[in-house]
Image (tube, rainbow, N blue to C red):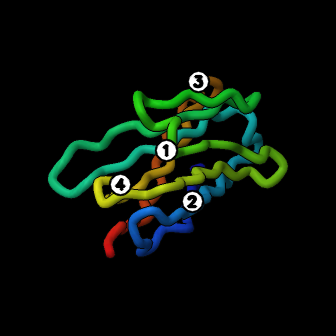
Amino acid sequence: QVQLVESGGGLVQPGGSLRLSCTNSADIFARYVMAWYRQAPGKQREKVAFVTASGTPDYADGMQRRFTISRDNAKKTVYLQMNNLQPEDTGVYYCNADSRYYRQNVWGQGTQVFVSS
């Protein structure tokens, strides 16, 4: 079973930045589309962005202005660079790996991001 390990969350002041990382244990990382989702307190989980195996990113509406998703296939890791964070960005950020080849969809355990002064 593929495992995803996230890191990089924490407490940051408004206007600050964080970079989240998610490492995939799969043998062939390139067969997974990697994505980041987030869930704010009391709200449903929403997609932030995904990146294809070739590195093509796609963002939910409004996310591209401050967030950048990228992947390093050699390190089997996907990143989410978050800039100019605001209190409304507070929530748990989840990594997701989806593979049509392996018919798998796997979630990480989540990493907490808290934006507050």
Image quarter of residue 50? top right
Q: Along the horizontal axis of the image, is 11 left or right of 32?
A: left
- Please tell me which residue is depicted at 50% across the width and 49% down the height of the picture: 95
First of labels 3, 4 by sequence position = 4
Select label 4 or label 1 by which is in front: 4
State the SS at label 4: helix
Residue 15, percent from left and from top:
45, 62
- Closer to the chain start, of discs 2 and 3, is 2
Q: Which amino acid does label 3 sit on?
A: Arg
Which of the two discs, 1 and 3, labels the residue nearer the N terminus? 1
Q: Do the residues labelled 1 and 2 touch (CB within 8 Å)?
A: yes
Please tell me whether mark 2 or mark 3 is closer to you in this view: 2
Please name the residue shown 49% across and 44% down the image: 36
Measure how far apart labels 3 and 4 are at the Cα level. 30 Å
The residue under label 4 is which amino acid type?
A: Asp
Q: What element carries label 3?
A: loop
Question: Which of the two discs, 4 and 1, labels the residue nearer the N terminus?
Answer: 1
List x then y, in percent, for residue 89. 35, 54
Q: In this view, does 101 lie above or below 48?
A: above
- How far is mark 1 from mark 2, CA to CA? 9 Å
Instruction: Report which residue position mark 2 lands on.
Output: 20
Disc 4: which residue:
89
Residue with the mark numbered 1: 36
Label 2, label 4: how far apart the Cα atoms are: 13 Å
Q: In which quarter of the image is the C terminus?
A: bottom left
Q: Kindly tell me whether residue 5 is visible in this rendering.
A: no
